[in-house]
């Protein structure tokens, strides 16, 4: 589950992820818009630290929207790229940009839950 405060309170989202594959490539995801009050109540139930990041959406020229996350505060220095696909085949056929340093799709240490509890993974 994930809580998100978008643009300093412009709106709030509660996300439930389920049926995730072992490699993290496939999952079901449902998002609900919630009120500020619901967000603040659910926030009291959180485990770990709050993740702070700025997300930039970048078109890749192939019809995909790349989401570049730049983390700060407790995760300062971490930057990663996320791409969502409509199918597993599309994901596996994707050729990542040459400037991508490492694919961490299947590395559970880079999932938000792990980052909030343990910080940036030590290589």
Image: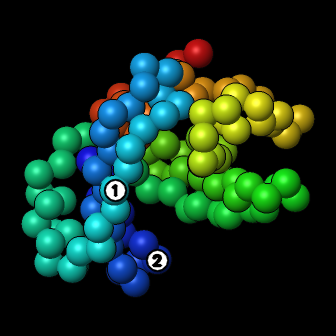
Residue lying at 22% horizontally and 79% vertically, measured from the top left? 36
Q: Nearer the viewer, residue 123 or 1?
A: 1
> Disc 2 and disc 1: Cα gap in Å?
20 Å
- Percent coordinates x, y for residue 47 in the rendering: 19, 41
Residue lying at 46% horizontally and 77% vertically, measured from the top left? 7
Find residue 7 and name its label. Answer: 2
Q: Secondary structure at mark 1?
A: strand
Q: Nearer the viewer, residue 18 or 69?
A: 18
Dividing the picture into quadrants, the one containing residue 105 is top right
For the image shown, how many numbered marks are present on the structure? 2
Depicted 25 relative to depicted 11: above or below: above
Dividing the picture into quadrants, the one containing residue 35 is bottom left
Residue lying at 28% horizontally and 62% vertically, measured from the top left? 14
Residue 97 in view: yes
> Which residue carries the number 1 mark?
30
Judging from the image, the colouring scheme is: rainbow
Residue, far bottom: 10
Q: Nearer the viewer, residue 33 or 12?
A: 33
Residue, far top: 123
- Percent coordinates x, y for residue 60 in the rendering: 82, 55
Q: Secondary structure at mark 2?
A: loop
Left or right: 120, with 11 as reference point: right
- Percent coordinates x, y for residue 123 in the rendering: 59, 15
- Percent coordinates x, y for residue 71 in the rendering: 54, 50
Left or right: 32, with 110 as reference point: left
Q: Are marks 2 and 1 in contact (CB under 8 Å)?
A: no
């Amino acid at each position: 589950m994930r809580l998100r405060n978008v643009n300093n309170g412009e709106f709030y989202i509660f996300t439930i992820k389920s049926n995730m594959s072992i490699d993290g490539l496939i999952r079901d995801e449902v998002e609900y818009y919630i009120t500020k009050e619901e967000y603040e109540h659910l926030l009291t139930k959180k485990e770990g630290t709050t993740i702070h990041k700025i997300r930039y959406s970048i078109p890749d020229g192939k019809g995909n929207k790349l989401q570049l996350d730049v983390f700060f505060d407790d995760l300062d220095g971490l930057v990663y790229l996320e791409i969502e696909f409509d199918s597993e085949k599309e994901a596996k056929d994707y050729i990542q940009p040459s400037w991508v340093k490492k694919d961490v799709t299947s590395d559970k240490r880079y999932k938000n839950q792990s980052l909030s509890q343990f910080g940036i993974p030590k290589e």
